[in-house]
Image: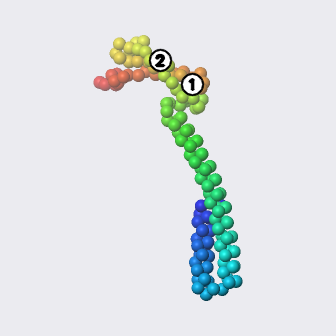
Amino acid sequence: MDIAAALSLLSQAIGVVKDLRDIDKGFDKAALKAQMADLYGSLADVKIALSDAQITIHDREQQIKKLEDQIATLTSGEGCPICNTGKLKVVSVHAHPILGPAGVQEKTLKCDNCTHLERRIIEPDGRSKRR
Ligand SMILES: [Zn+2]
């Protein structure tokens, strides 16, 4: 059962209480007993539905936590294009062998999961793109 079912049962129980109030005015003992039995039954069902909903909420919270952790992992650093599991970490940054004097650097990234290694040319201020 979910929260919608619990709420439906609860309004059913409230309806029974309303009927009980009306019976109280007329004081019909047999009808009162029958309504009380209905009320107990409805409230017991509400209790079950709410504890089911609590379990569902707890499961969802754990799922959300897990997804938040995955998002944090995926958004912190670039993912490896080879294994799709590891993160690329910068292992060295040095002047480019040829374009170094022009301010161009070469950055080496290594996957923390597999052996993938890649070099990238970085231009700190995009010098070669200017005309
Ligand atoms: Zn990798």
Residue 43: x %, y % from top left: 64, 68
Front in this rendered view, residue 2 or 85: 2
Q: In this view, does 109 lie to the left or right of 26?
A: left
Q: Residue furthest bottom?
A: 26
Secondary structure under tag 1 reads loop
Task: Decide: is 89 above or below 37.
Answer: above
Which one is earlier in the sequence, the residue at label 1 or at label 2? 2
Front in this rendered view, residue 94 or 43: 43
- Find the distance from the CA under tag 1 to the CA under tag 2: 14 Å
Residue at image point 38% right, 14% down: 100
Q: In this view, does 119 lie to the left or right of 57?
A: left
Residue 25: x %, y % from top left: 58, 85
Task: Decide: is 27 above or below 71.
Answer: below
Front in this rendered view, residue 54 or 82: 54
Front in this rendered view, residue 60 or 117: 60
Judge whether residue 19 can be spotted in this image: no
The kind of residue on which mark 1 rests is Asp
Residue 16: x %, y % from top left: 62, 76
Residue at image point 53% right, 35% down: 73
Secondary structure under tag 2 reads strand
Verify CB contact (< 8 Å) between mark 1 and mark 2. Answer: no
Residue at image point 61% right, 64% down: 6
Q: Which residue lies furthest to the left in this view?
A: 131
Dot 1 beta carbon under 8 Å from ligand 1: yes
The kind of residue on which mark 2 rests is Ser
The residue that label 2 is drawn on is 92
Judge whether residue 3 can be spotted in this image: yes
